[in-house]
Amino acid sequence: MGSLAGRARKIAKLPANYTGFKVLLISSSKVLGPSHSVLSNYEDVCVQKDDNGGFHYLVGDFRNGNQAQKFLENKVSDKLPSARIIHFQSGVWMN
């Protein structure tokens, strides 16, 4: 994956009923823009706002944990060691 810096992209909201696995890149108490140093390296970033006002920035759309794990290991972990896999069922965090 090459550098995506400088490309104008939008950060979509995580669909309310999303089921599957995503990689959590970063969480923040503030809204981050697509040019943020972490987010600018990934395509198709989405955000989920939690009940406490925090923002969770996620990437990927995986049907199983093994696919998400491979993506995490090959594309994310070296840059973001704290990134982790989140399993969603109908928009709810399962882990």
Image: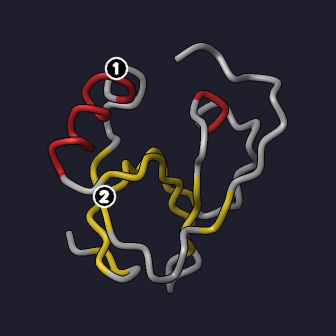
At label 2, the amino acid type is: Phe
Name which residue lies at 20% across and 54% down. 64
Q: Quadrant of residue 73?
A: top left
Residue at (37, 54) in percent of width and height: 22
First in sequence: mark 2 vs mark 1: 2
| Residue at 69% over, 23% down | 4
Q: Identify the residue at image location x=77%, y=51%.
A: 10
Identify the image's colour scheme: rainbow, by chain, secondary structure or one colour.
secondary structure
Q: Nearer the viewer, residue 53 or 25?
A: 25
- In this image, 56 relative to 5: left or right? left
Answer left or right for 65 relative to 28. Answer: left
Q: Quarter of the image holding residue 19?
A: bottom left
51 up-or-down from 79: above or below = below
In what element is the residue under mark 2?
Answer: strand
Residue 53: x, y in percent? 59, 78
Q: Residue furthest top?
A: 2
Q: Is residue 3 shown above or below 55?
A: above
Tag in front: 2 or 1: 2
Q: Nearer the viewer, residue 17 or 3?
A: 17
- Badge 2 crowding class, 10 Å Cα cut-off, few under 14, some 14 to 19, many 20 or more, is many
The residue under label 1 is: 78
Give how far across and how far down residue 69 sits, in percent: 21, 39
